Image (cartoon, rainbow, N blue to C red):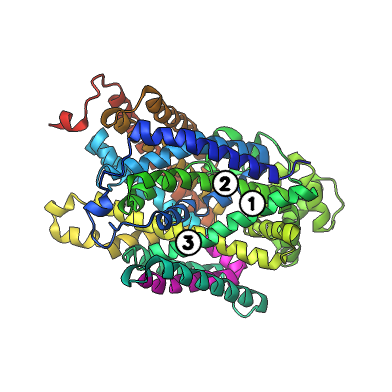
Amino acid sequence: MFQAGWLILLAIALYVIFYYTHGRYLQYKVVGASPRQQTPAHRMYDGVDYVPANKYVLYGHHFASIAGAGPIVGPAIALAWGWLPALLWIWFGNVFIGVVHDYLSLMVSVRHEGRSIGWVAGKYLGRSAFYAFNTYIWFSLLLVIAAFGFVISALFAKVPGAGVAAFLLIFLAVPVGLVMYRTKLGYAAGTILSIIFIILSIWVGFIIQTAGVFSLGFYEWLGILTVYIILAASLPVWVLLQPRDYMNAFILWASLVLGGVALIALLATGGGAMTFPAFTMFSANVVGGQPSPFWPAVPLIIACGALSGFHSLVSSGTTSKQLDNELHGLLIAYGGMETEGFLATMVVGTMAAFGLPAFISAVSAAVKSNGALAKLLSSIAASLHLPAGAPPSEVLKAMAANPAVFGKYYAILASKVKWVVIPGSYGYTLNAAFGIPVAVGTVFATIWITAFALTSLDTATRLARFTWQELVEPLRQRSPGLYRVVSNKWFASILAVALGMSLAATKQFLVIWPAFAGMNQLLSSLALMTIAVWVIRATRATRLGKALVVAPAVFMWATVTLALLWYEAAVVPVYLAKGGTHTVTGLAVGGITALGLALNLMLFALWLREVRVKRMVPAEARSG
């Protein structure tokens, strides 16, 4: 069997080569980045959103914000098609689309006063594009809040010690921020304090988990998260966002190093063999539990791990306002996307190699008290021609050895156990490589997984606030009183959170996630189209540089448009017919994706109009 450690070594080689060749080409031959050009963080400093940040602090914040649960949950679900197609999509998306999208969406915003990608679309594609793009973005962010809110609440309900550790870190981030930004002690003292607080939080979380003295349910955690992200999205970035993300970055880097080194170390002993199938079938049961063609449906599952439109919102929403030097952009945005790709690769490796014992543990613990899970296990056993009442370990081992049955039942089974198999497989990986107890590794994994997701959750809420405020800007002159109310940061944050978390409360994860991923991936192509017009008009990019932007934009637009049309035709009607919360969820996500498709077609038409213009002169000259 193929060992997962080889995936880690191949990924490292791939990313290093592309960073120093492809990345440098974009930096100097397309953008023309210069340390002499003053960034918006300095030019428009306001102490709230426009604040210059140390490049490593900003890299940590940016990486944590873009990653979220996307590169973890998406690749884990995609294993239903097999680990090989999932991995190939991740790597292809990373080096040909994701890094181009992320780096250039940051730099186009930096060159336009830290404005959002939606604002840039309005500048280069027309005012109607601005409203269409921002409307699309706002609805996409509702799905981000719904998807990540569900994942975090579900994992905290299963591993409450991780929830305690995560929120302890949130409270401790405030004094770290004060030390880093409001005293002369600065980053050195803030770093030392961060490491101490991280160790303390993880230790407390593990004690809570093993002692079993604290437990909250899914809806209780959802309520706590709702209050938290409203506050986090509205406070100045230096109070909570920057220091919390800086602290999280240490946990995230440690998780990547530990997981990667563990899989590499297992190469020497022959461990880490991938027991999940390399390929199952072209149309595995993935999206909404329905037979799903790998292409074009894969971007509805693997979102942030390969590429993500959400990244353009982070790059142009918060990161561009904190970039201290233009040359830092390559590390932060291009390097951040590659780091996320490495994370997705590690998830595929740990799940494919150690997902089976994690499944056996999770299912064995839950099957006696979960009638729906027991019924599903019986169906799997029947498909494998096993006797009724066969133990879970026997059924799951047989399923892993049968690609067709694995492709049919894997995603549904993992959803039944709330995806606790993801941190569980990481715990078994550390145990096999270093002898760390599985329980310790699982709690640690849950902490870093939810740390990713929490950062994206509050960043998404902040971005939804920015987007909403841009959308209601016309009311400033027409109705000043109404504008003051609806543009208020608290109103804007509460509106987005209330709608997003209400959708998360339906618990229909396998239909919410693909809707989020599809809108997210389509956003990446729309962002690339906007960037392409900027590159053509406002930069001195070479012909190759222009092609490096236009080609992935068109490819992604065609792929995701087809995928969402398939989703509307094949998945949404199934949920509408089920009744109850299934129907509510189907109506919500079906309506949002239908609106997204309509806005997408409109924006594509505007883009085609612009790229057909033969005299590609600067937009300022045309408007003047």
- Would you place residue 468 above or below residue 596 in this image? below
Q: CA distance from mark 1 to mark 2?
A: 9 Å
The residue under label 2 is 342
Q: Name which residue type carries label 3.
A: Leu
Is label 3 in a helix, a strand or a loop? Answer: helix
Name the side, left or right, on which 564 lies relative to 175: right
Q: Which mark is residue 355?
A: none
Magenta highlight: main SS: helix
Which image quarter: residue 136?
A: top left
Is residue 560 visible in the rendered structure shown here? Answer: no
**Where does residue 249 sit, x and y in percent of width and height?**
49, 59
Drawn side of residue 381 relative to residue 86, left or right: right
The region drawn magenta spans: 152-179
Q: Secondary structure at mark 2?
A: helix
Residue 120 position by quadrant: top left
Residue named by callout 1: 260
- Going 74% across and 65% down the picture, which residue do you hit? 365
Residue at (55, 43) in percent of width and height = 302
* Residue 275, x across and y down, in percent: 76, 46
Taking the spot 50% from the left edge, 46% from the top edge, the residue there is 304
Observer-nearest residue: 411 or 550?
550
Mark closer to the observer (3, 2):
2
Vertical order, 411 against 193 (above or below)? above
Q: Earlier in the sequence, mark 1 or mark 3?
A: 1
For mark 3, what is the residue? 454
Tell whether position 359 is magenta.
no
For badge 1, the amino acid type reads Gly
Look at the image and tell me in which quarter the C terminus lies: top left
Q: Earlier in the sequence, mark 3 or mark 2?
A: 2
Q: Quadrant of the N terminus?
A: top right
Tell me which label, 1 or 2, sits earlier in the chain.
Answer: 1
Tell whether label 2 touches label 1 (CB within 8 Å): yes
